[in-house]
Amino acid sequence: QRERFAAERDLAAARYGYLLGYLQLQAAVGAATTPAPLEEINSYLLAE
């Protein structure tokens, strides 16, 4: 039970890190001013 909780926590942290990095990359290239990055993130979250 404890290992499963730790694995789920680590997965959530990895997903958060991925999404944060993705948004930072989009901001760096100037794409964060369009709705496309948020739509991609929304698709990613809904696919879970």
Image (cartoon, rainbow, N blue to C red):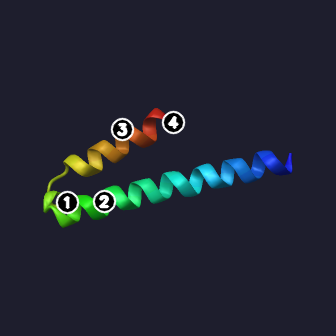
Disc 1: which residue: 32
> Label 3 near label 4: C-beta < 8 Å?
no
Left or right for 18, reference 28: right
Look at the numbered disc 1 and give the secondary structure of its residue.
Answer: helix
Q: Which badge, 3 or 1, is on the more N-terminal residue?
A: 1
Residue 36 in percent (x, y) is at: 20, 47
Where residue 34 sits, quadrant-wise, is: bottom left
The amino acid marked with disc number 1 is Ala
Which of 42/30 is in front?
30
Residue 46 in percent (x, y) is at: 44, 37
Compared to residue 10, the image places residue 40 above or below, namely: above
Which of 45/10 is in front?
10
Mark pair 2, 3: CA separation: 14 Å
Disc 4: which residue: 48
- Name the residue located 27 percent from the left edge and 44 percent from the top edge: 39
Disc 2: which residue: 23
The amino acid marked with disc number 4 is Glu
Query: What label sits on residue 43 in the rendered view?
Result: 3
- Name the residue located 43 percent from the left edge and 54 percent from the top edge: 18
Look at the numbered disc 2 and give the secondary structure of its residue.
Answer: helix
